[in-house]
Image: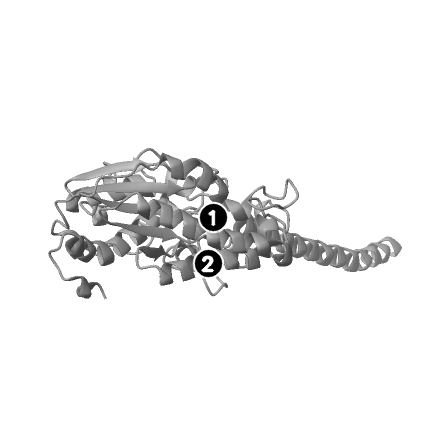
Amino acid sequence: MTQESSSEHDSTERKPVNSSFRKRLLILLVLGGILVGCVVFYVFFWLTHPIGSGPAGPDVNREAFEKVWSEQEVVLLGFGDSITAGFGASPGKSFFKLLVNNPDDDFEDVQGLTLSEVLPNLEVNNLALSGSTSIEQVDVLLPKIEEHPEEVFGIIVATIGGNDVIHMYGRTPPREGAMYGATIEVAQPWIDNYEERLDLILDEIGSRFPGGYHIFLANIYDPTDGIGDVQNAGLPAWVDGLQVLGAYNTIIEETCEKREDTTLIDIHSEFIGHGIHSTQFWRSFYHADDPGYWYYENLEDPNDRGYDAIRRLTLNKMAEVLPRKLKINAGKVPAILAQ
C-alpha cells in the first residue's frame, strides 16, 4: 500500500517537470526558427542578387527600323569609359556591339533592330577605355579621334564621368578625378571643372565630324537604387555620395538639354530598382515583373542584362532623333522640321 502511494506521488511530481521541459523546448524551437528565418531573410534580401533572365529594359520600336534611315556613310563612334567599352559583357553582348548586330542567341523581340539594318554604309570605331576618367578622356581619347571627311555623318555614344565619382573606391584620399569619400563642399570645385570639361569633350568630338553628327550621352547610374548605402555593397560608407552623384547627373542632363547635338540616355532612371536592393519588395522602386540585378560583379559595370537595357534605351532614342536628322543633314528635309 505504501509503495503504491509513493509511486503515485512520484508520477504527479514528474508531470509538471515534463510539462515545463516541453514548454521550454517549444520556446527554444520557436526562437530558433525565428532566428533562422531572420538570417534567411537578411541573406536573400540584402546579400544575394538574382540576375533573372529574358529581355531587360523597354521594348524597342520595331516600326522605326522597317525602313533604311540613310544611305550616307556613317561612323558609329564609342567614347568614354568601361560601360561603352563593354567591360564584363559576354562576347558580342556589350551595348555598343548590340547596337550594331544581333548575336545568334539574341532575344526574338529585337531581332533585326540594329543600326546595320537601317544604315547600310555603317562603319564602327569604339575608342572607349575601361577605367578612364573624364580628365584622362581629354588627354588620351580625344587625340585618337580622326577628323572625318564631310560626306561622313557621325553617331557618337558616350559615357563620361562615372569613374570621376567612384574612383578610388575609398582607398585613397579624395581628389579631382577620384572623388570617392569627398564632402560636397570639397567636391564642388571639381564638379564645376567637370561641367567645363564635358562641354570641351563634346565640342571636340563634334569638330571631328564636319559633315554632321549627333551624340548620345548617358548619365550615371546608382547601384544603391537611390538609397546611398554603398557600405552594403562592400565599399566604405560615403555620406555625401548621392549629392556628388546627383551633381554630376544634373550637369549631364542640363548639358543635353542645352545642346541640340546631344541627347540624354537616362540609364540612371532605368537602372533604379535593379541594384543591390532589387529583391526588396517593400521598396517603392521594386519591379515585380523583373526584380533582376543588372550590375556586373565589380558593381560599377552592367552585366549582360544591364547592357541589353542600355542597348534598348539607346536604340529608341536613336530612332527618335536620327532618321529626321540624317534627312536634314542630306538636304532632303528643311531644317525647320528639326524644331
Using the rendered image of the protein, determine whether residue 78 is visible from the camera's viewpoint: yes
Please report contact status of discs 1 and 2: CB closer than 8 Å, yes or no.
yes
Q: Judge from the rendering whether residue 20 lies leftward or rightward of residue 325; answer left or right.
A: right
Q: Looking at the image, which residue is at 11% across and 56% down?
A: 332
Q: What residue type is disc 1 on?
A: Gly
**Crowd class of label 1 (few under 14; some 14 to 19; many from 20; radius 10 Å):** many
- Comparing 319 with 284, the one in front is 319
Q: Residue at x 73, y 56 (%)?
A: 24
Assess disc 2: are there few (<14), some (14-19) or many (≥20) residues with their C-alpha within 10 Å of its C-alpha. Answer: some
Q: Nearer the viewer, residue 272 or 327?
A: 327
Residue position marked by numbered label 1 in the rendering: 161
Work out whether residue 291 or residue 330 is closer to the camera in this orientation and state it: 330
Q: Name the amino acid type tagged 2.
A: Ile
The residue carrying mark 2 is 251
Residue at the top extreme? Answer: 91
The residue tagged with tag 2: helix, strand or loop? helix
Is residue 308 visible to us here? no
Give the SS element for disc 1.
Answer: loop
Left or right of residue 37: residue 21: right
